[in-house]
Amino acid sequence: MLKKLYHWMMAQAAGRYAVPALAAVAFIESSVFPLPPDLMLVPMALADRKRAFTFALICTVASVLGGLAGYAIGFFFYETAGRWILNLYGGAEGWYEKLSVFFQKYGALIILIKGLTPFPFKVLTILSGMVKLNLLTFTLASLVARAGRFFLVAGLLYVYGEKVRGFLEKHLETALLLFALLVVGGFVAIKFLI
């Protein structure tokens, strides 16, 4: 099934409705869809490098809006839809509930770090709603994390083009993790310096 979804996304990235499809994928990936919008962002940005940052902006806005939908699932429907979705992504029964205390305390930091990586963002959005993380905190952390991720990918593609495609396909997780560490390190440095 994932392979079919992947091929559908590739066809959409090259198709006439690529931009609305990119927005739709970025939106639903933040609450239920298993594949990240990067799979469409990369070929679209390579095909039209002048619009790479526009595509990143579309991904960011749609992903944050989709994250709010995921938050709503966790907030209003955790016992039904939320638990079911989380269990699809490897959550053992009751595991997320045990994590909730930690998530209530460090939720924004977790979103900042994991939101930059290929970790399933929908898990973070649903958990945020489940623990009733402050909505403004959730939204701002999601905005920073998702913009960081998508604009990093777009920037690399804009500057290096096809040369970076192979690297991103092989090492996207590592690159995003290093970028996440830089962002978090920056926030920690600011906190201690101010």
Image: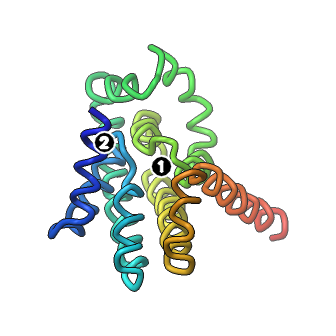
- Residue 168 got which mark? none
Q: Is residue 184 above or below residue 104?
A: below
Which residue is at 45% across, 41% downward? 120
Between the residue at mark 1 and the residue at mark 2, the CA separation in whole angstroms equals: 24 Å
Q: Is residue 171 left or right of residue 94?
A: right
* Image quadrant where one finds the N terminus: top left
Q: Give the camera-side residue of 52 and 74.
A: 52
**Extreme left residue here?**
16
Q: Give the amino acid type for the residue marked by disc 2 in the picture.
A: Phe
Disc 2 designates what residue? 33
**Residue at position x 36%, y 44% in the image:** 35
Q: What's the residue at 62%, 39% (across, down)?
A: 105
Dot 1 falls on a residue whose secondary structure is: loop
Q: Position of residue 95 (x, y in %)?
A: 52, 19
In the rendered structure, which disc, 1 or 2, sits on the residue that comes first in sequence?
2
Q: Which residue is mark 1?
A: 134
Q: Residue furthest right?
A: 193
Residue 60 shown left or right of residue 192 in the figure: left
Tag in front: 1 or 2: 2
Query: Looking at the rendering, which quadrant does residue 93 occupy?
Result: top left
Q: Residues within 10 Å of mark 1 (few under 14, many from 20)?
A: few
